[in-house]
Image (tube, rainbow, N blue to C red):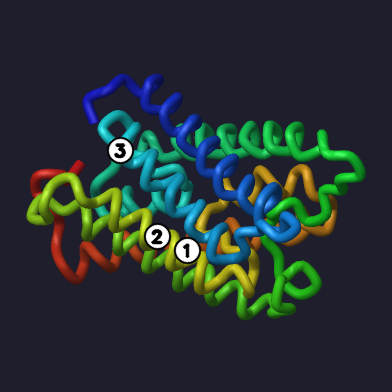
């Protein structure tokens, strides 16, 4: 990535804004709309489309990681410099918070609207299916691990150019189809942070899990992929 760091951080912030605004917006504004609600499948597709569109819009600028867990995973896969991990994460979290704030402003314009869980993640009473903390921890770790494998593998120099965004977007769609009933799907600490700030104290009290499990899953995914399949000499940093 030859762009200056400042430009890459702006791209990451906007891309994460787009992910939260688009994905969580589909959940808050459209999923439960009377008669025309898009349901879980529609929300899953919306999240996949946000990543797919940003992969082609800003991938050449910043890599379009849009996710602290992916950033850490790419670092451990030796695709990303360690000195830029923290700035990327800060930009992603800022973008996610702004995305949630804009969504809140729009949603609150409906008469009688109440934020409820506001597309935040949770387990126990906050789980759509009532799943417990262990279920949330395991699924977040496993799915983030797999997501990073897809990203590292699909961006390898031997993979046909130009198709990585499709694979990554479809992977995120699949992840949501699997795990929305469990914990509303995170695999992304920034995505979890933005809505939780506007949902309430109970959602914030569970936010730790949606940092710990995805970061560990992403780190394990990036490290193990490189250990098993080797480094990409053209992309190694």
Label 1: few (<14), some (14–19) or many (≥20) C-alpha neighbours in 10 Å: some
**Label 3 vs label 1, nearer the camera:** 3
Residue occupied by mark 1: 216
Front one among 50 and 95: 50
Residue occupied by mark 2: 219
Task: Residue at 67%, 39% (x, y): give it.
Answer: 100
Q: Is residue 170 left or right of residue 3?
A: right
* Secondary element type, mark 3: helix
Label 2: few (<14), some (14–19) or many (≥20) C-alpha neighbours in 10 Å: many
Residue occupied by mark 3: 56
Numbered label tally: 3
Picture coordinates of residue 175, whole percent (x, y): 46, 67
Picture coordinates of residue 236, whole percent (x, y): 17, 46
Mark-to-mark CA distance, 2 and 1: 5 Å
- Mark 3 or 2, nearer chain start: 3
Asked if the residues shown at circle 3 and circle 2 are in contact, with their CB atoms under 8 angstroms apart, the answer is: no
Front one among 115 and 85: 115
- Mark 3 or 1, nearer chain start: 3
Q: Is residue 176 left or right of residue 57?
A: right
Mark-to-mark CA distance, 3 and 1: 27 Å
Q: Is residue 221 left or right of residue 93?
A: left
Mark-to-mark CA distance, 3 and 2: 24 Å
Asked if the residues shown at circle 2 and circle 1 are in contact, with their CB atoms under 8 angstroms apart, the answer is: yes
Indicate which disc residue 42 carries. Answer: none
User: Please, which residue is most extreme toward the front here?
Assistant: 35
Task: Residue at 21%, 62% (x, y): give it.
Answer: 226
Q: Is residue 95 above or below residue 143?
A: above
Q: Is residue 15 above or below residue 217?
A: above
- Image quadrant occupied by the N terminus: top left
Picture coordinates of residue 97, whole percent (x, y): 64, 36
């Amino acid at each position: 990535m030859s762009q200056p760091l400042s430009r890459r951080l702006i791209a990451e912030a906007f891309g994460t804004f787009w992910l939260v605004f688009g994905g969580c917006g589909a959940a808050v504004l459209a999923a439960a709309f009377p008669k025309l609600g898009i349901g879980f499948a529609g929300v899953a597709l919306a999240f996949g489309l946000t990543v797919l569109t940003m992969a082609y819009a800003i991938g050449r600028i910043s890599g379009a990681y849009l996710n602290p867990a992916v950033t850490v995973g790419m670092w451990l896969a030796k695709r990303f410099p360690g000195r830029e991990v923290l700035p990327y994460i800060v930009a992603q979290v800022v973008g996610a918070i702004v995305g949630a704030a804009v969504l809140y402003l729009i949603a609150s314009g409906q008469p009688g609207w109440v934020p409820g869980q506001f597309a935040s993640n949770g387990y126990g009473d906050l789980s759509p299916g009532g799943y417990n903390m262990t279920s949330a921890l395991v699924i977040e770790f496993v799915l983030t691990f797999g997501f990073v494998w897809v990203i590292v593998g699909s961006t390898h120099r031997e993979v046909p150019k130009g198709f990585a965004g499709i694979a990554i977007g479809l992977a995120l769609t699949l992840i949501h189809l699997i795990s929305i009933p469990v914990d509303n799907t995170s695999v992304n600490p920034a995505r979890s942070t933005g809505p939780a700030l506007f949902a309430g104290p109970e959602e914030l009290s569970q936010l730790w899990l949606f940092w710990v499990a995805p970061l560990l899953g992403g780190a394990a995914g990036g490290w193990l992929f490189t250990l098993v399949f080797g480094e990409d000499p053209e992309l190694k940093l």
